[in-house]
Image (cartoon, rainbow, N blue to C red):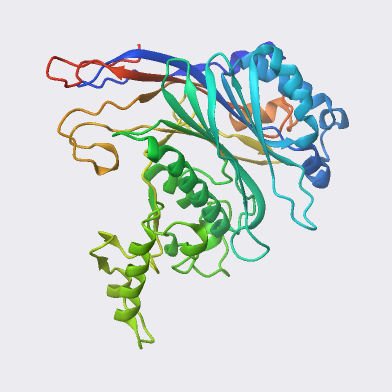
Amino acid sequence: MWNQHALSRFWRHISPATIPWKRHNKKFEFSVVSYNILSQLLLENNSYLYRSIKNEYLKSQRFQQIIKELELYDPDIVCLQEFDHQIRAKFASHFAPRGFENIYQRKPHIPYQEKDDGCFMMYKRDKFKLIKNASLGLYKDTEGLLDKPNCAQIALFECQDGSQLCVANTHLLYNPRRGDIKLTQLSLILHHIQQVVNPLQQCGGVPVIFCGDFNTVPNAPLYNLMKYGKLQYSEYTPDKISGQKGSKKLHKVAPGLWDDREMGFHEHGLIKRAENELLECRETYRSLTQGSSYVSQAYRDLQCSKCSDLYPYKSGSISHNINFRSAYDHIDCDGRTKEVTTYIQNDSRTVDYIWYSNHDNTPQNCAHGHSCDSYCSSPLLILKSKRRLLTKPELSNMGRLPNAILGSDHQCLQAMFTLYSDPVQDSSGRTWGNLSTD
């Protein structure tokens, strides 16, 4: 069975990319896995979802299957979600002789909400050195939009070739009706990622890989925020934001989703401006709208001379400045069948992703809008290949998950990347040349 499964999950190679103006001396290849391994506690608390599955597939045996699968794929970085605290020592002792270090972020403890899992990241010590671990719990209080015990990991690594790489790992809230909470959680993570990489950026910045179970489907508003860098969330009801379910009873999300003074960033742009500048913007806005019971669209779209951006209050939009692409295009090799990453009962869909930053650092379009007189010299992260996902018919023929082959109700995602750094320069100091992933 395992041999047949391995043959079905072959590498799908990506067409080589050519950058006509740039080439690099250093070339560093590595692979990344993202895998929701299904928390044992969550499985037992939701046992009704797995009634038709043999009991032997729901016990500790499935962790041996997960370990076997990870060994088969032999990744360099592993991002796991729903990782139970009790199995950390077992995983660490098993993979340490194989060259892995690990970091773990447990979900925050909230009264009356029993959670014992979190996000777990492993990396090969001969390829990566951990510089910074900015893991965070996505919980502030029992009220508001950060009242759920989710978490994220943000790690900054120095690679074997001396370049740097940021890797993030998360598991967002499941509740299909609370896309507003998922949006808040994702925005907070993106803000922290930018805090890690922006101080280090030159033109293109540090490459970023963002893994996890996002509990959103392809082309949903939350997905589009990742892909396109912006979202007018006030156009959607909370249940439509992640695309998992629709309801006619919910109202659209109101502009001003959160208080930026508490969150640490504006809703229109995730980068926090200087505090005195922010206060001055608020005073300008208040003076213009003082005594008015109705704030017109013109005032909502107030152009602030200090911020050189639309005033964030009541804009109903959110944006970030990382040019993310999904390693998977959500269509199988035949060009018709949809990829799926999870299969529970008869419900199959894509909710797991490996996102990576893909900067278009041409002189005319430098990342973050910089005006560069010469060619950018930032590292370049290229997707080389991805491991094929099984389709719904294939998973259905295999049997409901978990089963004798797969230890989780999610599939394991794996992508191979090439990181190019140290660009070649001509006598004038300008970087140039051809780059191919061959």
Q: Quadrant of the C terminus?
A: top left
Query: Above or below — where is 8 with respect to 202?
Result: above
Question: Could you tell me residue 323's position as x and y percent?
Answer: 36, 39
Question: Could you tell me residue 209's position as x and y percent?
Answer: 48, 32
Number of marks present in the image shown: 0
Name of the residue lying farthest toward the left: 428
Query: Above or below — where is 247 with respect to 366?
Result: below
Q: Quadrant of the N terminus?
A: top right
* Residue at x 66%, y 19% (from the top left corner): 70
Q: Nearer the viewer, residue 247 or 194?
A: 194
Q: Quadrant of residue 365?
A: top left
Query: Above or below — where is 414 with respect to 190?
Result: above
Question: Could you tell me residue 58's position as x and y percent?
Answer: 82, 32
Name of the residue lying farthest toward the right: 55
In the shown orientation, is residue 53 left or right of residue 236? right
Task: Look at the image and tell me whether residue 310 can be seen.
Answer: yes
Task: Look at the image and tell me whether residue 404 can be seen.
Answer: no
Q: Quadrant of residue 123?
A: top right
In the shown orientation, is residue 264 left or right of residue 297? right
* Residue at x 26%, y 16% (from the top left corner): 23
In the shown orientation, is residue 140 left or right of residue 273? right
Query: Above or below — where is 124 with respect to 282?
Result: above
